[in-house]
Image (spheres, helix red, strand yellow):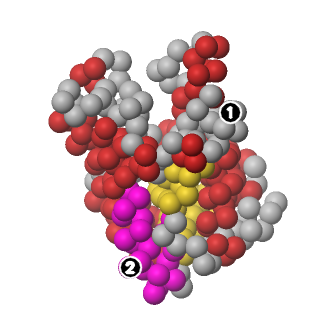
């Protein structure tokens, strides 16, 4: 087991999904103790069990990141269990690709208000609430790292991902910079990782014909889609003391996609 995160307590939201699970397992492998939160309590408990079976130490709790009371309870319970927080990993988020146009994130002329409000509530307000309640704990611990999972859609916009998703991630990038400037004096670093298309997530709702796969991969100079591990390896660096002079960064992890757009 690596010791890059030894002694650190990391709170990971959206921990039941593919990216959240990868973060939980990898952070624990590098020595962190992990507080895992997700709206799906059964699945997040299963991830906790996986971490512990692999020799790590984990705590799991249900959370609705759009509810301030729920977020407050999540932070308080994590502090009660571990005694401190060093890392906040804002991973919870949604990208609405519903089965009908009325359920999907489409262009603004056709976009249902409910889709707009729901995605902004989860992807942007959720990060605000988690940061609001966790950053004081990071300050009390002498400083720490906030890692926001954004998207290349927040840098470039996207016809594929939808207007609301792009807006939510663009707002998250701006919030990242603002929080970085505000809390640097408290030794709290705030950075955003902007993944391109990731394999496990792209499987849902998209026909995976060889032609479709080839078309998707052609967008990336490296020649493949990403994986959760591509994201979490950078997150480990940002969570560790190795990145002590890195804050306010909006970092694409996208196989070169944004460099050619």
Give the labeled residue for mark 2.
Answer: 182
Is disc 2 placed on a helix, strand or loop?
Answer: helix
Residue 126 horizontal side relative to residue 50, left or right: left
Residue 51 horizontal side relative to residue 163, left or right: right
Give the labeled residue for mark 1.
Answer: 224
**Residue at the image point whose x is 36% and y is 64% from the top:** 175
**Residue at the image point whose x is 44% and y is 40% from the top:** 40
Compared with 133, 117 (above or below) is above
Calculate the distance from the C-alpha at mark 1 to the C-alpha at mark 2: 37 Å
Q: Quadrant of the N terminus?
A: bottom right
Compared with 9, 171 (above or below) is above
The magenta stretch is: 172-191
Compared with 141, 114 (above or below) is above
The mark that comes first in sequence, 1 or 2, is: 2
Asked if the residue under mark 2 is in contact with the one under mark 1, i.e. CB atoms within 8 Å, the reply is: no
Which sits in the foreground, 46 or 124? 124
């Amino acid at each position: 087991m690596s010791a890059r995160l030894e002694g650190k307590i990391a709170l990971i939201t959206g921990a039941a999904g593919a990216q959240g699970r990868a973060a939980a397992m990898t952070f624990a492998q590098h020595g962190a103790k992990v507080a895992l939160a997700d709206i799906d309590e059964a699945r997040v408990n299963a991830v906790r069990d996986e971490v512990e079976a692999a020799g790590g130490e984990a705590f799991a709790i249900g959370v609705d990141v759009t509810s301030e009371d729920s977020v407050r309870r999540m932070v308080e319970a994590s502090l009660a269990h571990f005694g401190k927080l060093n890392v906040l990993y804002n991973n919870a988020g949604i990208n609405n690709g519903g089965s009908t146009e009325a359920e999907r994130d489409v262009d603004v002329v056709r976009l249902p208000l409910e889709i707009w409000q729901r995605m902004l509530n989860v992807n942007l307000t959720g990060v605000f609430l988690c940061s609001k309640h966790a950053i004081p704990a990071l300050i009390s611990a002498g400083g720490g790292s906030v890692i926001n999972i954004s998207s290349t859609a927040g840098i470039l916009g996207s016809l594929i991902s939808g207007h609301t998703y792009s807006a939510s991630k663009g707002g998250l990038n701006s919030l990242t910079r603002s929080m970085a400037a505000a809390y640097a004096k408290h030794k709290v670093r705030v950075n955003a990782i902007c993944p391109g298309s990731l394999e496990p997530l792209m499987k849902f709702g998209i026909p995976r014909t060889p032609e479709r796969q080839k078309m998707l991969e052609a967008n990336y100079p490296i020649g493949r889609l990403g994986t959760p591990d591509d994201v979490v390896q950078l997150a480990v660096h940002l969570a560790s003391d190795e990145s002590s002079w890195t804050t306010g960064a909006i970092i694409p992890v996208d196989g070169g996609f944004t460099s050619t757009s």
